[in-house]
């Protein structure tokens, strides 16, 4: 049996953890996985395309605020690009959620 708080191994009939004195349940969960086993961004489905669809709206919003007084026409185009990018990102996220389930 493993302690659910600290992950220390204990006897199956132990009522308290030998390391941290946490009360043990009759069926304790498995020990926590090592930090190296955490899924990476690529495993979670965030690839280069996801990063691009995140950066384009962000860059458009920044450029809008940089150009809004000096170059209003370019600022409007940057704002439009940003809004389109956010829309595409939202649609892709919804599709990803629907396809996962």
Image (cartoon, grey):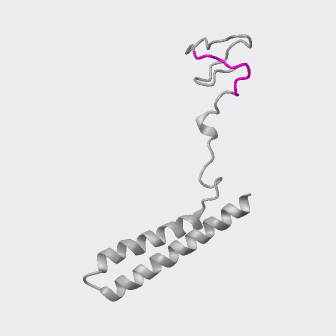
* Foreground of the two, 31 or 99: 99
User: Is residue 23 on the magenta stretch?
Assistant: yes
Picture coordinates of residue 38 (x, y %)?
Answer: 62, 42
Picture coordinates of residue 36 (x, y %)?
Answer: 60, 38
Picture coordinates of residue 71 (x, y %)?
Answer: 29, 86
Q: Is residue 24 above or below residue 80?
A: above
The chief SS type of the magenta part is loop
Residue occupying the point 58% across, 17% down: 22
Stretch in magenta: 22-30
Quarter the N terminus occupies: top right
Q: In the figure, residue 96 lies in which quadrant?
A: bottom right
Count of marks, rendered view: 0
Q: Is residue 8 above or below residue 30?
A: above
Q: Is residue 30 above or below residue 43?
A: above
Q: In the figure, residue 34 lies in which quadrant?
A: top right
Q: Is residue 4 above or below residue 68?
A: above
User: Is residue 26 on the magenta stretch?
Assistant: yes
Question: Farthest left residue?
Answer: 70
**57 to the left or right of 66:** right
Residue occupying the point 72% across, 58% down: 100
**79 to the left or right of 95:** left
**81 to the left or right of 95:** left
**31 to the left or right of 53:** right
* Foreground of the two, 49 or 69: 69
Quarter the C terminus occupies: bottom right
Residue occupying the point 62% across, 23% down: 7
Q: In the figure, residue 4 lies in which quadrant?
A: top right
Picture coordinates of residue 54 (x, y %)?
Answer: 51, 66
Residue occupying the point 45% across, 76% down: 82
């Amino acid at each position: 049996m493993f302690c659910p708080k600290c992950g220390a191994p204990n006897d199956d009939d132990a009522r308290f953890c030998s390391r941290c004195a946490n009360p043990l349940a009759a069926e304790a969960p498995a020990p926590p996985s090592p930090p190296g086993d955490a899924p990476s961004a690529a495993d979670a489905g965030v690839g280069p395309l996801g990063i691009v669809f995140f950066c384009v709206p962000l860059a458009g919003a920044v450029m809008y605020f940089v150009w809004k007084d000096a170059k209003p026409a370019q600022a409007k185009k940057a704002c439009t690009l940003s809004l389109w990018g956010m829309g595409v990102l939202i649609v892709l996220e919804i599709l990803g959620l629907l396809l996962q389930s």
